[in-house]
Image (spheres, rainbow, N blue to C red):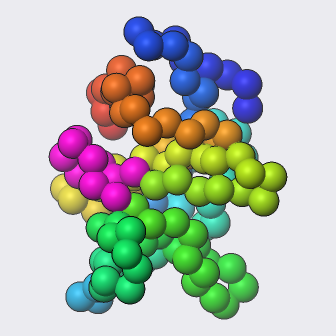
Amino acid sequence: MGRKIKTNSGAVPFPVVHTFKLTGSSSTVSQYELIKIIGESPKLSKYISISRNRNFVKSEPEYYLSKKEVGDWPLLIGLHKTNIVEVLIGYREEEDLNVNTLLVRFNNQDMTVTIYYFEKDYSTDLIQLLPFMKKLYKRG
C-alpha cells in the first residue's frame, strides 16, 4: 500500500491486480482460479465465482462476485456496469469503514477476468482511473 499513480486529476493508489482463468460455468455462474497477481499480497482468494444478477436486491448490480472460503462461497460484492466495454465496478466496505474500489475486466478471448483492487480508495469518478486502465490494457 502507499504506491500511487499520478493522473491528470490527482493520484490514484496502485491496485493489486488479480488475473483469474475460467475453470467452469453454468448458465448463471462462472468459476475462476487465480493464475497471476501484480502488486502486494492477494486481496481475494485463489478461487472466485461471478454470477449474473437474478433480481434479488434493489441496487440491481449486473453481476455478483463471491470468493471461496473453506467450502463456502460468501457474497463479496455487487458489480455494476460502467461506460467502458467489458469493465464493471464494485465497492467493498471493510469493518474499519474504509471502502475499496474493484474494477473487473472480462477478456472473453482468453477466458480470463482481471480484477483491479484499489485498497482504501473510493472512486465513483472513473475518469481518474482511465489513464491507469489504458496502461494496463496495453500490457494485457
Q: Residue at x 58, y 29 (%)?
A: 14
Residue 76 found in image quarter: bottom right
Q: Position of residue 66 (x, y in %)?
A: 52, 74
Q: Which residues are magenta?
A: 80-89
**Quarter of the figure with the N terminus:** top right
Magenta segment: does it hold 129?
A: no
Viewer-nearest residue: 90 or 49: 90
**Quarter of the figure with the C terminus:** top left
Q: Is residue 42 visible?
A: no
Viewer-nearest residue: 83 or 35: 83
Q: Is residue 82 visible?
A: yes
Q: Is residue 74 left or right of residue 126?
A: right
Q: Residue at x 40, y 32 (%)?
A: 125
Up-down relation of residue 93 to residue 32 (above or below): above
Q: Residue at x 55, y 24 (%)?
A: 12
Q: Position of residue 52 (x, y in %)?
A: 31, 77
Residue 57 found in image quarter: bottom left
Q: Position of residue 108 (x, y in %)?
A: 21, 59
Q: Residue at x 56, y 39 (%)?
A: 122
